[in-house]
Image (spheres, helix red, strand yellow):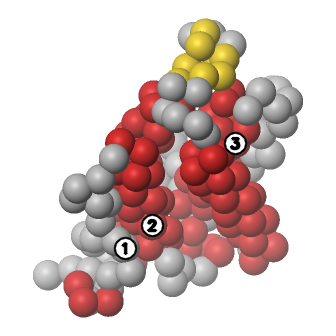
Amino acid sequence: MPEMFLPEHEDPRVDAPYVGDERSTLAGFLTFQRDTFRLKCAGLTPEQLARRAVEPSSMSLLGLIRHMADVELGWFRTVLSGDDAPQPFRTPDNRDEAFDGVIGDAAHLADAWAAWEKEVAYADQFTASAPDLSVTGVEKWRGPMSLRWVLVHMIEEYARHNGHADLLRERIDGAVGQ
């Protein structure tokens, strides 16, 4: 049987509150998904994280880190806060630059993690300080979007990409689960 990422008793993730208000429940589920994502990327070299899935896909764990930094920035900083902040891993000519531009070296990986951590911290601060979950921003194609909708969407976004990360990680070193 393949190895788990960690023995179960060493799993650092914390479940969302079993009884709590809507904000703490949604924020807890999002944190759990982010921690799962971080766990699936842990302990690998930059070269391993940059390893592509299968042709013709350019998906890799490092590409997912970069993509999720862009997604966090896009929803919390751009849509909800109204900032005109460019996504660091997307170019006007290539929406998939987060995946296509991956390089398996330490500096490239450090930049990706730093961008992701910065945007996660921003999103957490925004969520904690919002007066309620009905706070809205404007998404250019869909129109008004509430913080509530964005939190649910982000949980879904991470859950979907954590499934991708499971397959990528298993291909790299055989680790499964968690």
Residue at x 82%, y 32% (from the top left corner): 83
Can residue 12 be seen at all in this image of the molecule?
Answer: yes
Residue 45 figure quarter: bottom right
Residue placed under numbered mark 3 in the picture: 73
Horizontal and vertical percent position of residue 175: 32, 77
- Position of 97 with respect to 10 (left or right) is right
Towards the viewer: 134 or 141: 134
Q: Mark 1 to mark 3: distance in Å? A: 23 Å
Towards the viewer: 157 or 97: 157
> Which labelled disc corresponds to residue 13?
1
Which type of secondary structure does the marked residue at label 1 adopt? loop
Q: In this view, does 42 lie above or below 131?
A: below
Which type of secondary structure does the marked residue at label 3 adopt? helix
Could you classify mark 1 by the number of other residues whose Cα lies within 10 Å: few (under 14), some (14-19), or many (20 or more)? Answer: some
Residue 113 figure quarter: bottom right
Q: Mark 2 to mark 1: distance in Å? A: 6 Å
Residue placed under numbered mark 2 in the picture: 35
Which is nearer the N-term, disc 1 or disc 3? Answer: 1
> Which labelled disc corresponds to residue 52?
none
Towards the viewer: 9 or 93: 9
